[in-house]
Image (spheres, helix red, strand yellow):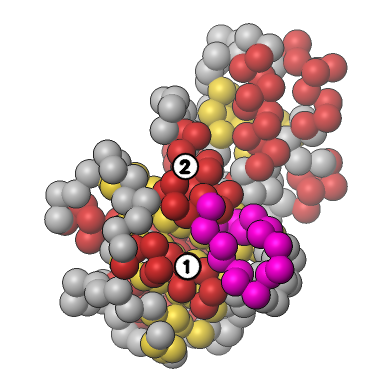
């Protein structure tokens, strides 16, 4: 395992959404916009081996193994990705802080091709798990049941297991999810954005123009929602919004879409675009937790 401080080609190890995390970390800890963008501009690296790469920043530890989506696209490999934001409730050092996790896999065989993680702790154990599976050409099914924390006396599902299970479930249906980076265009086009967080969460920061309807109130307020328009649903980290999308579909709403990564992912994305300046942002405030 290779522990690396910030290097000139750090963005060569990560996808764009992880670059947003790097940008926020370095900008809020003293570097100028120009300094960070210069650091992120070099995306070249040798094609990856099975090495675990860990970068220690100020507030985050980032890890990667295998290919990035950019490298897979350049190699013309047909792949999919699954992303999960979740509180870190288990592992060797549970922090209950948000974990940003992505796994890349072959579209046909489901063979795992790469993984990226951002968290305060528990990066190493998860990269070791991915490496063990990748070294034998393993796939998502193996990751579902893999014991990520070998010191546990009992098998407790890790967020890696949950991510793999979610990815396999999506394979059986056509996904209508949208990415956090799409929100700016949707907002400017006056699309219907639905925020299903609690009112206090909404007041602390939201996408401008979004309608706030907490998940628990959807049934009683369903008649206030348009059935003839696309509805783009977000919450904090895409868990409640996924429930809301499924519930709305059961109520006859066909044009509903979950926003992957939720408002946390939106915040990282917009902070990078805004250069940390809310004046012309599509959000009223950022939320990274």
From where the camera sits, is residue 107 visible?
yes
- Quadrant in the picture for the N terminus: bottom left
Is 233 on the left or on the right of 213, as rendered?
left
Residue 129's disc is 1
- Quadrant in the picture for the C terminus: bottom right
Q: Position of residue 69 (x, y in %)?
A: 30, 56
Q: Residue at x 64, y 49 (%)?
A: 237
Q: Residue at x 60, y 63 (%)?
A: 99
Up-down relation of residue 121 to residue 186 (above or below) = below
Q: Position of residue 186 (x, y in %)?
A: 49, 34
* Residue designated by label 2: 167
Rounded to the nearest whole Å, what is the CA distance between mark 2 and mark 1?
17 Å
Q: Is residue 149 magenta?
A: yes
From where the camera sits, is residue 208 visible?
no
Q: Residue at x 47, y 67 (%)?
A: 129
Q: Position of residue 79 (x, y in %)?
A: 28, 46
Q: Position of residue 176 (x, y in %)?
A: 46, 28
Which portion, as a residue range, is magenta?
145-160
- In what element is the residue under mark 2? helix
Q: Nearer the viewer, residue 269 or 44?
A: 44
Magenta part, dominant SS: loop
Q: Residues within 10 Å of mark 1 (few under 14, many from 20)?
A: some
- In what element is the residue under mark 1? helix
Q: Residues within 10 Å of mark 2 (few under 14, many from 20)?
A: many
Q: Residue at x 46, y 39 (%)?
A: 168
| Circle nearer the N terminus (2, 1) | 1
């Amino acid at each position: 395992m290779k522990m690396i401080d910030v290097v000139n080609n750090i963005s060569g190890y990560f996808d764009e959404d992880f670059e947003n995390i790097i940008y926020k970390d370095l900008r809020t800890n003293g570097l100028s916009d120009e300094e960070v963008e210069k650091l992120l501009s070099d995306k070249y690296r040798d094609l990856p081996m099975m090495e675990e790469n860990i970068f220690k920043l100020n507030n985050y530890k980032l890890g990667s193994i295998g290919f990035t989506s950019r490298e897979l696209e350049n190699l013309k490999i047909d792949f999919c990705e699954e992303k999960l934001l979740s509180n870190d409730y288990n592992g060797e050092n549970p922090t209950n802080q948000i974990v940003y996790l992505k796994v890349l896999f072959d579209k046909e065989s489901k063979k795992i091709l790469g993984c990226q993680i951002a968290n305060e702790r528990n990066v190493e154990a998860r990269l070791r798990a991915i490496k063990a599976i990748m070294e034998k050409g393993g796939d998502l099914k193996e990751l579902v049941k893999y014991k990520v924390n070998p010191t546990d006396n009992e098998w407790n599902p890790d967020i890696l297991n949950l991510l793999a299970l979610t990815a396999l479930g999506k394979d059986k249906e056509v996904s209508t999810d949208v990415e956090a980076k799409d929100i700016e265009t949707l907002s400017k086009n006056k699309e219907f954005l639905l925020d299903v967080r609690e009112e206090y969460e909404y007041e602390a920061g939201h996408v401008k123009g979004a309608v706030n309807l907490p998940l628990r109130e959807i049934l009683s307020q369903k008649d206030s929602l348009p059935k003839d328009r696309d509805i783009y649903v977000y919450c904090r980290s895409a868990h409640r919004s996924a429930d809301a999308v499924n519930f709305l579909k059961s109520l006859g709403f066909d044009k509903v879409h979950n926003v992957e990564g939720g408002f946390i992912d939106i915040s990282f994305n917009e902070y990078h675009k805004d250069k940390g300046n809310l004046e012309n942002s599509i959000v009223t405030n950022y939320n990274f937790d």
